[in-house]
Amino acid sequence: FILLSGYAGQVADRFSKRSVTQWVKIVELPIVVLAAIGFYFQNLWLTLFALIALTCQSAFFGPAKYGMIPELVDETDLSRANGSINMMTNVAVIVGTLIAGVVSDAYSPQEGKVVGGGELWLPGVSLFLVAIAGLVSAMFMVRLPTGQTGLKFDPNPFSIYTVTLKEMVKTRLFMVMMAWGYFYLLAGIALCIVPQYTVV
């Protein structure tokens, strides 16, 4: 994710963010099919490969998602639109985490909870339905500007971070970025810790 986000930002700036979003969502379909096969046959390496592929796909989706906001709304509505996108992203993460718990229990039932084998098809079907919903949503997006077609592609994935950080340090945006990162750090830690407390 860290390696590809610099490239993904350049792609989102160079091409229409609508087109980038649609292509990213199209690529998601074969990845979730691979994940479904991996889950069904309980192949760890195939599911790990699908996980890595999904993180790569997600890295390319992020810059297009956030970059299109100024192209969709007036400047006066920018804060409200950013807030709405962030709120819905967090709601999606929470709902996805809840659904994942149910799917995980059905896929690999704990001893004494479920009689018989697990539902080996359920994770794949769940991922596929989410991917289809995302693709349908992307297809109904309004047309957006074509982007900066003359943008020179920088092969160094870290140079964009260096330039951006230097610019952000000069403004209050740097502290906003640090606060945002801290929030997601706490959320990530909570997601790692909560499953350990099966009995409270």
Image: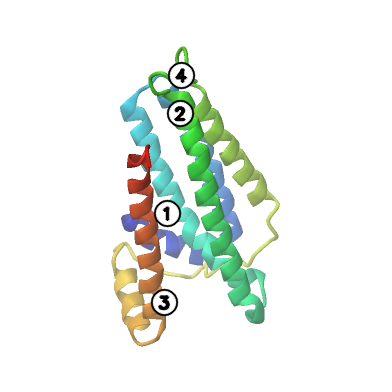
Quadrant occupied by the C terminus: top left
Estimate the x, y position of residue 149 in percent, counting from the top left: 52, 67
Q: Is residue 58 above or below residue 65?
A: above
Amino acid bearing label 1: Ala
- Name the residue located 65 percent from the left edge and 77 percent from the top edge: 77
Badge 2 or badge 1: first in the primary sequence = 1
Give the mark toward the camera: 2 or 1: 2
Q: Quadrant of residue 169?
A: bottom left
Of residues 174 and 68, which is closer to you in this image? 174
Mark 3 sits on what residue? 176
Estimate the x, y position of residue 34 in percent, counting from the top left: 44, 29
- Name the residue located 31 percent from the left edge and 56 percent from the top edge: 3
Q: CA distance from mark 3 to mark 4?
A: 44 Å
Mark 1 sits on what residue? 59
Badge 4 or badge 2: first in the primary sequence = 2
Asked which secondary structure carries label 3, the reply is helix
Estimate the x, y position of residue 2 in percent, counting from the top left: 32, 57
Mark 4 sits on what residue? 118
Amino acid bearing label 3: Val
Q: Which mark is residue 136?
A: none
Residues marked 1 and 4 touching at CB (< 8 Å)? no
Residues marked 4 and 2 touching at CB (< 8 Å)? no
Mark 2 sits on what residue? 105
- Name the residue located 48 percent from the left edge and 25 percent from the top edge: 106
Give the mark toward the camera: 3 or 4: 4
Q: CA distance from mark 1 to mark 4?
A: 32 Å
Badge 1 or badge 4: first in the primary sequence = 1
Q: Residue furthest bottom?
A: 170
